[in-house]
Amino acid sequence: MKYYISLLTFLFFTLVASAQDSRLATQYYNSGEYEKAAAVYLKMYQKQPNSYYYFSQYVKSLIAQEDYPAAENAIKKEIKKNPQNVELYVTFGNLYERQSMPEKAEAQYRHAIDNMPADVAVINKLGNEFLRNTKYDLAIEAYLKSQDVLNDKNIFANNLADLYKRIGDIPKMIQYYIAAAEKNTQQIDYFKTIFQRNVNTDEGKEELRSQLYAKIQENDSNLVYPELLEWVYIERADYYSALKQARAMDRKHDENGSRVMNIGNIAYNSKDYDTAISAYEYIIEKKGASNGYFLDAKGAILKTHVKEVTESYDYTAGQLDTLDNEYSTFIEEMGINPKTELIVKQYAEFLALYKNDLGKAISVLENLVGISSVNKYVRANGKISMADYYLMQGEIWEATLLYSQVEKAFKEEYLGEVSRFKNAQLAYYAGDFEWSQEQFKILRTATTRLISNDAIDMSIFIMDNMGLDTTDVPLQMFAESELLTLQNKHDEAFAKLDSISILFPKHALEDDILYQKANLHLTLKDYEKAKELYTTIYSEYKEEIRADNALFKLASLYENQLENPEEAMLLYEKLFIDFSNSTFAIEARKKFRTLRGDNVQ
């Protein structure tokens, strides 16, 4: 027992001493004290004669101090002792290169490649040694020769892809990354990341598409090629081609439709509604009602139809009636139950926001939340929506009752915070500023950033405007204008805002009135007037709390409705630079980077 303890103690102190020597040698080498570095590396190599690392560092130290005879003598001794170590010939060639003897250097490099054994580890070390000496072409030659030596064309595919990337040969890089993916089929997501980082031009993506297509023609049973090709189409925003690929794979491998559904969702989020609908219709028609994605696809088609019609802002009552009939037909066929709960809620939202049929929207939701087996979160969200619609109808008591029910049931959760915020907002609309202010103060520490930010804004806004000039009347009138806006009573909202300006000229609410008017014009699609007002706010009221809000809204307006991404970029940049403490700064930076073309996660 004492012997083993002594042995362990000896080994421990040996390792510690070795680590200290290694650090010392590295320190000497990095500071240009090559003679001292060589002495320490030689000492370590003599202790561990099988360590090629210590030997190579010893030789490098000799070469660095231009002691070429000593370096050559050391290499020749090592070759005599271990002639199978082909790395030594690379070191020898490097020594000759340092002495301007290119022919002798080439002979040593050639000897290393020509005498490469059929040993994966040795070949890998040889390739890495060429790489360390920036001999990329020779490293490539060694790995290519290994394909015959080892009878495996893909064994060093990753290494070759990396080397071709270094020398800028994109087609070859792509070829070998595909080969590497073919060999490692379980790592397909890793190779998608690799391609995303290294194939970022239209020419590169076309080369990748072309090579993958050729591979599929050669071997259509390998899932890697079509899956990567599908990904390429998505990267190129060619969602229809991606869908064709996904459908082909789904049919060929008898999949469950998840791949096609995913393409549909990607196309929907990218506003390619025709492709999205084609994907969802495939699920419905080819997979049938028993498929797990059937109802999701049904709901997605309805949602896409709504988005397709309403996004243009010039939809007709007839188009809305058609959508209403589609929803009604679906509910008649499928019923209101836990399986259709999300689509039913979606229908109520359509009725309230687009058909302006608040009574029917509330009725639909009442049927949904009344089902005992419905998901508790869906029920809670349904109640919140019902409360919103009651508020829009002016039924304050019904609204606050429902908000309070959800707040109580989900006290420590997100939905509870949402309900508390909405209740505080309702009290604000009603003119109970002190109570609403207290609730907003509490919600400043909400777990969700959006609620926290909104609560901070409301708290500061009320504090800044409550009791100015010994009266709350201007604030009360402003709150009423916001409620009128919520209730889609736009003319009355404008009139209320104008009244504040007439009765209380140059009031501190001046920028808020302009901001509210700008939002109203945005809702009414009067983009030029909205642009004018947002610009006035952030340029003439820079010290007021609405300045950053207006700037963010204006940037979004340029990005989305005005389709001017260049101007949007400038405004987002201005926001996160000039208003770095704004709650919008992080989001503005993210949007700026996205518009610039950065890969933002």
Image: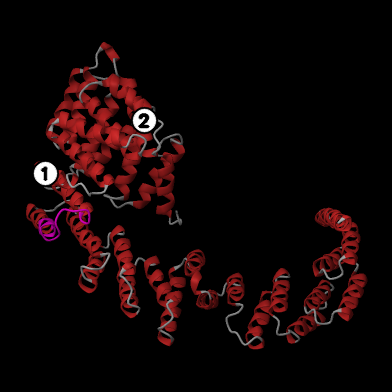
- Camera-nearest residue between 447 and 256: 256
State the mark number for residue 363: 1
Whether residue 1 sits left or right of residue 153 in the image: it is: right
Q: Alpha carbon of mark 1 to alpha carbon of mark 2: how far?
A: 31 Å
Closer-to-camera residue (447/579)? 447
Any magenta on residue 334?
Answer: yes
Secondary element type, mark 1: helix
Disc 2: which residue: 443
Q: Residues within 10 Å of mark 2 (few under 14, many from 20)?
A: many
Badge 1 crowding class, 10 Å Cα cut-off, few under 14, some 14 to 19, many 20 or more, is few
Q: Secondary structure at mark 2?
A: helix
Note whether residue 409 is visible.
yes
| Figure label count | 2
Q: Amino acid at mark 2?
A: Leu
Tell me the residue at 31%/39% (across/down): 415
The numbered mark at residue 399 is none
Q: Looking at the picture, does residue 387 appear above or below residue 86? A: above
Res 269 quadrant in image: bottom left
Q: Quadrant of the N terminus?
A: bottom right
- Please give the range of residues in magenta: 327-340
The residue type indicated by label 1 comes to Ser
Residue 325: quadrant of the picture:
bottom left
582 vs 352, nearest the viewer: 352
- Furthest toward the top, the residue is 470
Q: Nearer the viewer, mark 1 or mark 2?
A: 1
Instruction: Name the residue at 76% across, 80% down.
Output: 109
x and y percentages locating residue 242 in the rendered image: 34, 71
